[in-house]
Amino acid sequence: MGWKEMSEAAKNTASSNQLLRRDVRFLGNILGEVLVHQGGQELLNLVEDIRETSKNLRAQFDSNLYAEFKRKIVGLSPEMRHQVIRAFAIYFQLVNIAEQNHRVRRKRDYERSAGETIQPGSIESAAADLKAKGVSAEEVKEILSNMSLELVMTAHPTEAVRRAILDIHHRIAEEMMELDDPTLTHRERETLREDLRSEVLTLWQTDELRDRKPTVIDEVRNGLYYFDETLFDVLPEVYEELERCLTKYYPGEKWHLPLFLRFGSWIGGDRDGNPSVTAAVTEETLRLHRAMALKKYEEGLHKLMKHLSFSTSLVNVDPSLLESIAADREHIQLRSEDVWRNDKEPYRIKVAYMMEKIRNAADSSKKPQTKYNNPAEFKADLELIDRSLRSHYADFVADKYVRKLIRQVELFGFHLATLDIRQHSKEHESAMAEILAKMGICADYAALEEQAKVALLSDLLEDPRPLTSAYIEYTPSTRECLDVYHTVFRAQQEFGRECVRSYLISMTQSASDLLEVLVLAKEAGLYRIDRDGNVCCQIQPVPLFETIDDLHAAPGIMTTLFELPTYRRSVQAFGNLHEIMLGYSDSNKDGGVVTANWELRMALKSLTEAAKPYDIKLKFFHGRGGALGRGGMPLNRSILAQPPETLGGGIKITEQGEVLSQRYSLKGIAYRSLEQATSALLTAALLARRPQSDLTNPEWESVMRLISEKAQEKYQDLIFRDPDFLEFFKESTPLPEIGELNIGSRPAKRKNSDRFEDLRAIPWVFSWTQSRYLLPAWYAAGSGLLSYAQDDPARMDQLKRMYREWPFFQTLVDNLQMALAKADLLIAKEYAGMIKNREVADRIFNQISEEFKLTTRLILEITGQQEILDNVPVLQESIRLRNPYVDPLSYMQVQLLTELRALRDQGGDDAQLLREVLLTINGIAAGLRNTG
C-alpha cells in the first residue's frame, strides 16, 4: 500500500470514527431530552455535572476535586441517586448499540469503497490465500471434509440484560441503521428521530431487573431467540459466500460444502449443579427446538411460494413434480384457504401441500402420508422442486430461493441444534452405587479402588443383561439419573440421532467416570453389543477436565480407556472420533490466567499424542466464557490460538451469556463473527496440514513452563494459602449481592457452602470485574514473567522475540493488556475500603497493587509500547471514553453496598437499597462490556 492509499485509509478510518462519535452524541442527546422530560432539567444538570467531574478526574487527578466528587455522590437523595444510576446505565446501553451498528457500517463501507480489494478476515481472504499458496481443489475439498466448528449456546448466568430490554435495543439498532440512508428526506429523518426518542423513553420506563429468576424453559426460549432473529438465515449465507469464493478461485469445480459450521446448545440439557434441569425439562426443550425449526420452514415455504408463479402455459415442469402433487392430493385434505386454485401454477400447488406436511410433522396422530416424518423427506421435496426449476432454465430462482431452504434443512434438520447433556461425575457414581447394591452385585461400589471399578464396569458393558428393573424402587436422584437416558433414547427415535450425541461429565477425574455413563446408557438402549460383537453406541461420554490437576491426569485417563477393547469399539461407533472438553474457567480459578492458558495448551498437545497410537481423532470442546478471566476473546482469535495439530477432529466452543447478544442479536454482526470464524478455521486447517517449524520452538516452551510455574505459585500463595484472602474477596466485591441478581436459573454455588472450591467460576470473575480489579484476568502474570526476565537484557530480548513470532505468547500478552486496560486500582481501592479489618485490607490490596504495577511494566517492555493497548488504539480509545461514565456507577455501588451491609449486619434490610445495588451491577456490566 502506497502513501496515497495509506493516507486515504487513515482518512476513511478517521471519517468512520467520526460517524461513531456522531451516533453516540445523537443517542446521548435523545437520552438527555428523555431525562429532562422525566426528571426535569435538574436531573440532566446533575448527571452532566457528575460526568464532567469524573472526566476531569480522569484527565488529571486532583485530591480536592476527588473529595468533592465523592461528597457529591454520597450526598444524593435516594430518589435522585436512583435516577442518576439509571441514566448512566442506559447511556452505556445506547453506546453499545452505537458501537455494534458501527461494526456493521464499517464492513459495508469497506465493501463499498474497496472495489476489488479483499477485506482481511473475510471468507474471500481465506479462499484467495489457499489459491495463492498453491493448494489444489482436491486438497481444499479434503480440508473442508475434515474441518469442523460447533458453537454451543449455554445458559451460564452472565447475561445481565432482560429479553424485554434486548428487544428495545434491537429496535433502536434497526432505526439507527436507517439513519445512514442518504436518500432520506428531512421529514423522514425527523420521524426516525421521534421513533428513537419514543424507544429511549420506553427503555427508561422498562425495568432492567427481573422480578424472578428465569426458569430453564425461559432460558431455552432466550436461546431460540437468536435462531429466530439471525442464525437460521445467517448461517446458510456464510456457506453461500464460501461456495461463491471457492467457485471464483477454483473455476470449473462443483462445490457443495459439507457441514463444517453448526450450532449446538446446553440450555435445557446442562444439569450440573442445577436441580431445575430434569428429564422432563430436557424433553420439553427438544420439543421447543423442533417447533422452532418447523416454524422457520413454514415461513420459508410461504416466502418461496411468492416466487414460484411459473405457469405451465409457458414452461414444461418435470413430470415427477406433477406425480408428487397427485400423490399429495390423494392423501392430504387441505384447508380451503390453503388450496391454490390456479391449476397452471404447479409449484404453488406443491408448496401448499408441503406447508401442510410441515404443520403435521410434530403431530403423532397424523398418518405418515400426510406429514414429513423426517428431514430427509422434506429435503427430497425441495430437491424435486430444484430439479424441476432447472429443467426449464429457472436456475437463477433455484439458486436464490430453493438452495437456501435445502441448506437450512441440512443444517438444522427437525432438531434445530444438537443438545448436549451435562452432569457432575459424582451423580453417576452415586446412582451406580445404588443400582449395583440393589442388584447384589457390589455392596459399596463407591469405596472400590479405581482399577476394580474399571474392571467391574467393563464386565457390565460386555454383559447383555439389564441392571435395572421397573419393579425396583430407587431414590429420586437415581431415578432422575436413569430417566435422562430413557428421555434421550426416545428423543433420538422421535427427533433423529443428531438431537443429542454427547453426554458431558463435569469434574472427570478417572476412567470410571466415563464407563459409568456408558453402563447407564446401556440400561436405556443407547449402548448395546450385537450378537456379532459389533458395538452400537448412540451417545458418547465426554470428559470435562477442569482443574490443573485434572488437566495433568487427562492423558493417562484417556489412555486407560483407549486400552479397553469394549470402550474402543464404542469410539469406533462414532467414526473413531472422541470428544474431550477442557474448562477455561475452573482452570483459571484454580491456577491463574498464565498457568491456565499454558496448561490447557499442553493438555491439548498431550491428549492428541495419547490418541495417536489408537488411530483416534479428538474433537476438543473449549469451555470459554465471555470474560477475559474465563478464556473470553473474539471467536476467530480463539480458533487461531489453538495448536494447529490439535484441530484434526474439529472443535467446539461455548458461546455464553452476554456473548450471545453481542455476537448474534444483529444479522450484520452475526454474519461478520461467523465469517471471521470460517476464515480462521480455513487458515488453521491449512496450518495443521503445513505446519511452520518455528511455531513449536522447544526453547520457548521451556521458558513458558518456567513462567507458568512461578505464576501459579504466586497466584496460589494469595488465593489458597493466604488465610485472610476469602475475607478480602467477599468484603471488597459485590459477590453476595450478585447472587441476588436474577440472571440465571442455576445457583451460584455447586453446594450450599462458603468454601472457595464450591464457588462457581462465573460469580468469581463477575465480582472481580464489578469491583474493577479484574484480578483473575492478569494477577501473577508479572511475577511469572519476572522469574524468567530477571532484568537481564538478553532474556528480555527473548521474550520480545516470543511476542513477535509465537502466536500463543502474543495472544496471552495481548489478553493481559486488555485486562490491565480495563482494571482500575484507584476505583478498586474504594471497594477495599469496605473491608472491616484494615490490616487485611491494606496488606492484600498493596500486594495486588504491586503485582499490577509489575505486570504493566513488563508487558510494556515486552511489547515496546508506551502505553497499554497502544497496539489496539480503537479499543484503547473505547475504554478511555467509557471510564468516566463507569466511575460514578462504581463510586455509587461502593456507597450503596456499605449502607446495605451495615443495615443487614444489624438484622435489617432495604429492598430499594438492594435494587439500586443491582442497577449499578447492570450498569457497570454494560459499561465494561463484560460480566462473567
Image (cartoon, rainbow, N blue to C red):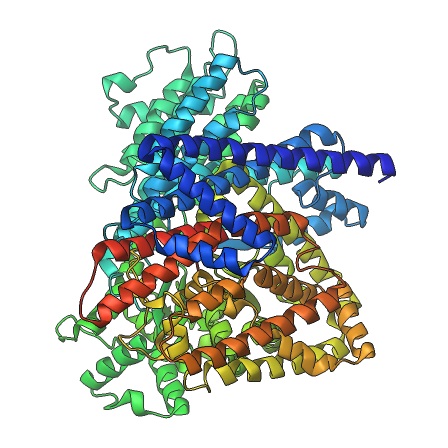
| Residue 718 makes an appearance in the image | yes
| Residue 929 makes an appearance in the image | no
The answer to which image quadrant residue 456 occupies is bottom left
Left or right? Give the position of 714 relative to 759: right
Residue occupying the far front of the picture:
64
Left or right? Give the position of 118 relative to 66: right
Residue 683, relative to residue 722: is it above or below? above
Looking at the image, which residue is at 72% across and 59% down? 687
Quarter of the image with the N terminus in it = top right
Quarter of the image with the C terminus in it = bottom left
Could you say where residue 357 lies in the image, as x and y percent from the top left? 31, 32
Camera-nearest residue between 145 and 793 = 793
The answer to which image quadrant residue 444 occupies is bottom left
Camera-nearest residue between 641 and 758 = 758
Could you say where residue 655 lies in the image, as x and y percent from the top left? 47, 55
Residue 548, relative to residue 99: is it above or below? below
Could you say where residue 574 lies in the image, as x and y percent from the top left? 48, 63
How many marks are shown on the rendered structure? Answer: 0
Camera-nearest residue between 816 and 118 = 816
Left or right? Give the position of 362 relative to 656: left
Looking at the image, which residue is at 73% across and 82% down? 790
Residue 85, relative to residue 474: is it above or below? above
Looking at the image, which residue is at 67% across and 50% down? 873
Residue occupying the far right of the picture:
2
Residue 488, relative to residue 345: is it above or below? below
Could you say where residue 227 lies in the image, as x and y percent from the top left? 41, 42
